[in-house]
């Protein structure tokens, strides 16, 4: 039994659904209709039904989705079952925030190694990890690490990405605000904070800006989330 | 002259185009075809043409888009012209990384204030800003600040968001991994690092996981970016 390839936009929303379902499950709910889930997480119900239908989750009319089954199914689709070991490169402010972030375990992520180039940091302990020398990235080959997080300055990011790929990492979350080239077999997602911030003003047109906005787009703030 | 409302997904890509166009412009290019821009930034050409057509940028066959005009147009559509003052709340590791991040100016963002609740931080200077007491958020009303960045723990995020909204902020970038309720007139975008990481494994199915993947989705790594 095979399903269509799931669109990137659906993959983007599945972790949001997963968190919502987990919270509802923790509240003791056994089943959930798309409308209630929609209200809970702030996505529209039609979108949820469409997204879940990509992998055959249709829900029962009047009953909805079985919460535990749906959670299991989404984890399976996202390939989160079994967990993933993650390596962090760059233990500056951002990297330290990543190490201290408590939200990874719920998705089965375990940060098992952290690297930096600063001799003052190498060998020091941070959040239960001894920071290692970034020139020893190849050491990862002997570990079962398939995801990496890059939190180094832009000018170093490509070299670090190359090192991670050589060490067997196939998925990279990159915080450096640069484009990084990776082989086709590797998936990279970049979070460029300024680029995300740059989307906000579109939704909050000011009188001042509207008057000079000769393209006349009727952008309205919509309290939307993503 | 009015255009259709621009889809969120297009708004998401416009800052990516803007960065690419700026880089090409810095290299001395006057015009650019969608194919060359596509190759440069790693988005497909059809998508670029469609996105730009939402605000009437059609390009000339065989010539492409005038770089400086396109840059101006995208800035205008995104409401980046004139610049925006930004406030940061939470100067821990993540907030410090945000303050030190050099990428904001290119989009016209200026971080003009930083707040924290820690008495040891309040009054201290960090990246040219004196950290202020978070209980004094209302002080922002007298300033022209319409965007806010929340880098506080999840349990404090809703209260901070309420304070920002009261102070006149209409766009919020939230790093706390919680859902925040804001009035309809306010746009909020949440970056939940774990949720972004949770999208990666889908694209790197392992032999181990595939064999137990009874939904049989043919996910293939595609070197995609976003």
Image (tube, coloured by chain):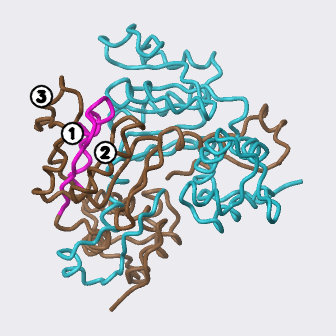
Chain colours: A cyan, B brown
Instruction: Please report, as a chain letter, where disc 2 is located.
Output: B
Check contact, mark 1 vs mark 2: CB within 8 A.
Answer: yes
The residue depicted at 42 percent of the width and 75 percent of the height is: B52
Q: Which residues are magenta?
A: B83-106
| Separation (CA) of disc 3 from disc 2 | 20 Å
Q: Are marks 1 and 2 on the same chain?
A: yes
| Separation (CA) of disc 1 from disc 2 | 8 Å
Q: Which residue is mark 3?
A: B124
Q: Which quarter of the figure has residue B200?
A: top right
Instruction: Choose the circle earlier in sequence order: 1 or 3.
Output: 3
Name the disc covering residue B24, or none: none
Instruction: Choose the circle earlier in sequence order: 3 or 2.
Output: 3
Tell me the mark number nearer the camera, choosing from 1 and 3: 1
Instruction: Choose the circle earlier in sequence order: 1 or 2.
Output: 1
| Separation (CA) of disc 1 from disc 3 | 13 Å
| Front in this rendered view, residue B12 or A115 | B12
Helix, strand or loop status at disc 3: loop
The picture places residue A37, in percent across and down from the top left corner, at 64, 56
| Front in this rendered view, residue B220 or A50 | A50
Q: Which residue is mark 2?
A: B160
Name the disc covering residue B134, or none: 1
The residue depicted at 49 percent of the width and 29 percent of the height is: A102
Instruction: Please report, as a chain letter, where disc 1 is located.
Output: B
Badge 1: few (under 14), some or many (20 or more) residues near its Cα, within 10 Å?
A: some
The residue depicted at 35 percent of the width and 47 percent of the height is: A193
- Residue A109 against residue B158 in the figure, above or below: above
The picture places residue A64, in percent across and down from the top left corner, at 77, 58
């Amino acid at each position: 039994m095979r399903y269509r390839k799931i669109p990137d936009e659906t993959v983007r929303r599945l972790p949001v659904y997963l968190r919502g379902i987990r919270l509802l499950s923790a509240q003791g709910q056994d089943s959930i209709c798309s409308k209630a889930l929609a209200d809970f997480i702030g996505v529209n119900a039609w979108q949820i039904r469409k997204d879940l239908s990509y992998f055959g989750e249709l829900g029962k009319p009047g009953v909805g989705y079985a919460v535990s089954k749906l959670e299991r199914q989404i984890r399976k689709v996202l390939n989160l079952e079994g967990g993933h070991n993650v390596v962090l490169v760059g233990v500056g402010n951002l990297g330290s925030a990543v190490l201290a972030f408590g939200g990874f375990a719920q998705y089965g992520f375990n940060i098992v190694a952290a690297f930096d180039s600063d001799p003052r940091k190498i060998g020091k302990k941070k959040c239960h990890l001894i920071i290692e020398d970034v020139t020893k990235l190849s050491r990862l080959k002997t570990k079962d690490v398939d995801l990496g997080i890059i939190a180094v300055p832009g000018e170093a990011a490509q070299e670090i990405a190359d090192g991670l790929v050589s060490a067997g990492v196939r998925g990279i979350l990159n915080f450096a605000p640069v484009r990084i080239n990776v082989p086709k077999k590797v998936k990279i997602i970049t979070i460029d904070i300024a680029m995300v911030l740059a989307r906000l003003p579109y939704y909050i047109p000011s009188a001042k800006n509207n008057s000079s906005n000769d393209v006349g787009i009727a952008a309205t703030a919509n309290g939307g989330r993503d």
